[in-house]
Amino acid sequence: MHDPHTPHQNSAPAALPWRDTRTLYGRITRLLHWAIAALMLWQFTGMVLKLALGRAPVVGFFVGSHQKVGTVLFVLIALRVIWALANRGHRPDHGAGLVGLAARLGHLALYAVMLLVPVAALLRAWGSAKPFAPFGQQIFAAQTPEIGWAVGFGELLHGEAAWLLLALIAGHVLMVCVHEGLWRDGTLSRMAGRRRLTGADRSRDFR
């Protein structure tokens, strides 16, 4: 006879929580994650098209929005970092051993470079002879004359760090494919879809 106090081992997917738990990421983390991913896809598409096609009209469509999209990305990335710190004791673990260590270091590098790219762009904008006013709201006035070191260093750092970020994202996607295709450990379900939780999972999540 079934004990009503004993949780079912194969229960239906639980409602997705707002905050992160020890087995999955909550709604806010997922919203920030996929919004940032979509906007980065837009930015990198524009960069690749610019290299491939030069001044073609389709390139102008992407490049014309680069500053505004980058500004939104900076805000979302900052929120993502703050939210990750607020949930640091309740997030899914990356695992033990070398694989877990590599995952932790990879995520730290991804966060650091995600912040570095827009910060470098802001440094360049601060030193520029043109005002920086995304969405019509001035953030930095025009510098007269421009601050050469800020523009040069910001330009260099922004460009190189952006390609490094693309490489880190590619590695991140590759490892998700390894987890899902080879190890089949349900890693993707932590950030997408609803994961079926057992009673043991729930007790671990909400201790």
Image: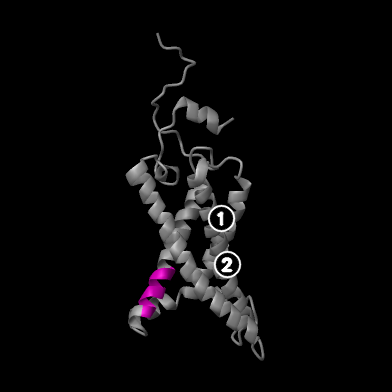
| Residue that numbered label 1 is attached to | 108
Foreground of the two, 52 or 26: 52
Q: Residue at x 46, y 58 (%)?
A: 35
Q: Is residue 119 inside the magenta stretch? A: no
Residue 160 coordinates in the image, percent (x, y) = 51, 73
Residue 46 coordinates in the image, percent (x, y) = 40, 73
Amino acid type at image mark 2? Leu
Query: What is the C-alpha distance between the residues marked 1 and 2?
Result: 12 Å
Left or right position of 111 against 172: right
Tell me the crowding category of disc 2: few under 14, some 14 to 19, or many 20 or more residues within 10 angstroms, Cα based: some
Above or below, 180 against 77 in this view is above
| Residue that numbered label 2 is attached to | 116
Quadrant location, the C terminus: top right
Report the span colored magenta: 43-51
Label 1's element? helix
Q: Nearer the viewer, mark 1 or mark 2?
A: 1
